[in-house]
Image: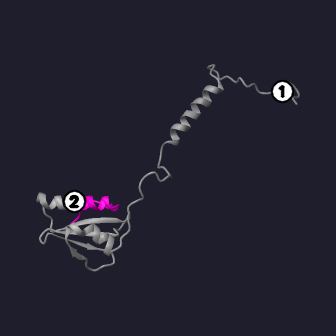
Amino acid sequence: MIAHGLSAPSADIRYRDGSGVHTFCAFATTVLLLLSGCGKSTSNTGAAPIASHPDVTVDFDGKRRKCIVSLPNEAQGSIISCEEVVSFIKGELRVPRNAVYDVRTIPQSDSDAYRAEIAKVRANLDSAGYRFMGAPSE
């Protein structure tokens, strides 16, 4: 009910420049849609985050040409052939797939054969479903 000369607002409201509310709404909606794509996503679309500590560590001993495999709670690891790392981690240590591993070298060597051995073990661990924690460290 309208009283005393007041009228209902018109659906065709115009601004001074003649543009309509529809133009403003379209602009505001576009801005909101663009801004909604900014910021960090709350959905987990990628792999699980890497742990702060590895579940298993593989040390490459360049002098002995062996690998030392250890769990975080072990004071010293097991010295094994680098070719047996994956089977040892799966069978003996029973580390589940998706566990995080780290690679260290003792002492550091730059030989192509040494780097190839490290790359081969890492590729085998990745193929077995383990996740690499980070860059090799000393």
User: Which residue is more in the foreground, 83 or 64?
Assistant: 83
Can you see residue 135?
no
Q: Please determine whether, in this image, residue 126 is positioned above or below residue 13.
A: below
Seen in the image, is 136 located left or right of residue 65? right
Q: Which mark is residue 6?
A: 1
Query: Where does the C terminus fall, quadrant-wise?
Result: bottom left
Mark 1 is on which residue type? Leu
Q: Please determine whether, in this image, residue 15 is positioned above or below residue 134.
A: above
Q: Which mark is residue 120?
A: 2
Check disc 1 and report its element: helix, strand or loop: loop
Q: Residues within 10 Å of mark 1 (few under 14, many from 20)?
A: few
Who's the residue at 28% across and 69% down the image?
A: 87
The image position of residue 127, as x and y in percent, is 31, 58
The image position of residue 77, as x and y in percent, is 25, 77
Mark 2 is on which residue type? Lys
Can you see residue 104?
yes
Query: Where does the N terminus fall, quadrant-wise?
Result: top right
Query: Closer to us: mark 2 or mark 1?
Result: 2
Seen in the image, is 128 located left or right of residue 113? right
Closer to the N terminus: mark 2 or mark 1? 1
Q: Is residue 132 magenta?
A: yes
Instruction: Give the magenta part as a residue range.
Output: 120-138
The image position of residue 57, as x and y in percent, is 28, 69
Seen in the image, is 109 located left or right of residue 33? left
User: Which residue is more in the foreground, 37 or 8?
Assistant: 37
Who's the residue at 19% across and 71% down the image?
A: 81
Who's the residue at 64% across and 26% down the image?
A: 22
- Which of the 4 image quadrants contains residue 104? bottom left
Q: Is residue 92 magenta?
A: no
Check disc 2 and report its element: helix, strand or loop: helix
